[in-house]
Amino acid sequence: MRTLPNWIRMHVAALRALLVFTVILGLAYPLLVTGISQVVFPSAANGSRVEVNGKVVGSALIGQNFTDDKGNPLPRYFQPRPSAAGKTGYDPTSSGASNLGPSNPDLVKAIKQRRTQVAQFNGVPESLVPADAVTASGSGLDPDISPAYAAIQVNRVAKARGLSVAQVEKVVADNSYGRGLGFVGDPGVNVLGVNVALDRLQR
């Protein structure tokens, strides 16, 4: 029986290896990981979606704007930090920062304008406006704000909704988290969680 040339046998072996690893790594492994995640972490595996009356209103992991049709912030809702992702912000397909350095005149001007706008919108001195209220995150999709930014919005939201400050503060506290393991990262408040909870409170 005539044996195949060495170069053909090498290509056949390479093709077999390609097929085997394609099945293992391209099909079996992803299906296994997907199956495990659906059983162990179903919410996270499906995007940490937030539903209201059976309708998905967003994700706990991705920020979104709370504005009217003209892009103006709605007083009854807590507002997120600025976003440079996409034309109107918080576009998951355009995740990213503005790439402007801290000394860039355009960024400096934008921060000053935002500080004035945030202070006027919330009825507080500009000195109380925290950094995350005027600067975007690196991804542009940050769903959380600092406790300091949430604190300056409480009175405005309470007044717009006809609620007591204590009621709004409790909702904020219920949707807040501390440092991971007590020392990793910064404390935060989930904006979508707070706004959904406030809407449910007034149904």
Image (tube, helix red, strand yellow):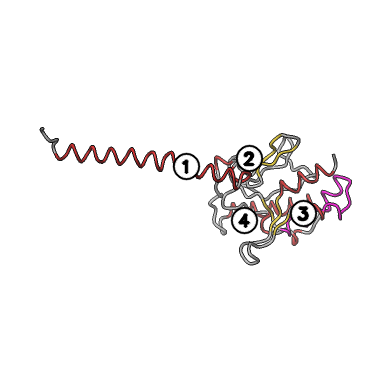
For numbered disc 1, what is the local secondary structure? Answer: helix
Give the alpha-carbon distance from disc 4 to disc 2, as whole Å.
20 Å
Residue 4 left/right relative to 62: left
Q: Mark 4 points at which residue?
A: 108
Q: Which of 181 and 136 is in front in this view?
A: 181
Decide which of tag 3 and tag 1 comes sooner along the chain.
1
Q: Classify the position of the C terminus by image quarter.
A: top right
Q: Quadrant of the N terminus?
A: top left
Residue at the spot of label 2 = 88
Report the number of numbered marks. 4
Which image quadrant is residue 202 in?
top right
**Residues marked 4 and 1 touching at CB (< 8 Å):** no
Please give the residue where the numbered disc 1 appears in the rendered image.
30
- Which of labels 3 and 1 is toward the front? 1
Instruction: Judge from the rendering whether residue 108 lies leftward or rightward of residue 147; answer left or right.
Output: left
Span colored in magenta:
147-168
Between disc 4 and disc 2, the foreground one is 2
Q: Nearer the viewer, mark 2 or mark 1?
A: 1
Q: For numbered disc 4, what is the local secondary structure?
A: helix
Judging depth in this view, the residue of 9 and 172 nearest the camera is: 9
Numbered tag placed on residue 174 in the rendering:
3
Q: How crowded is mark 1: few (under 14 residues within 10 Å), some or many (20 or more)?
A: few
Q: Is mark 3 on a helix, strand or loop?
A: helix
How far apart, in angstroms, are the residues tagged by discs 3 and 1? 36 Å
Spatial separation of the CA atoms under disc 4 and disc 3 = 34 Å
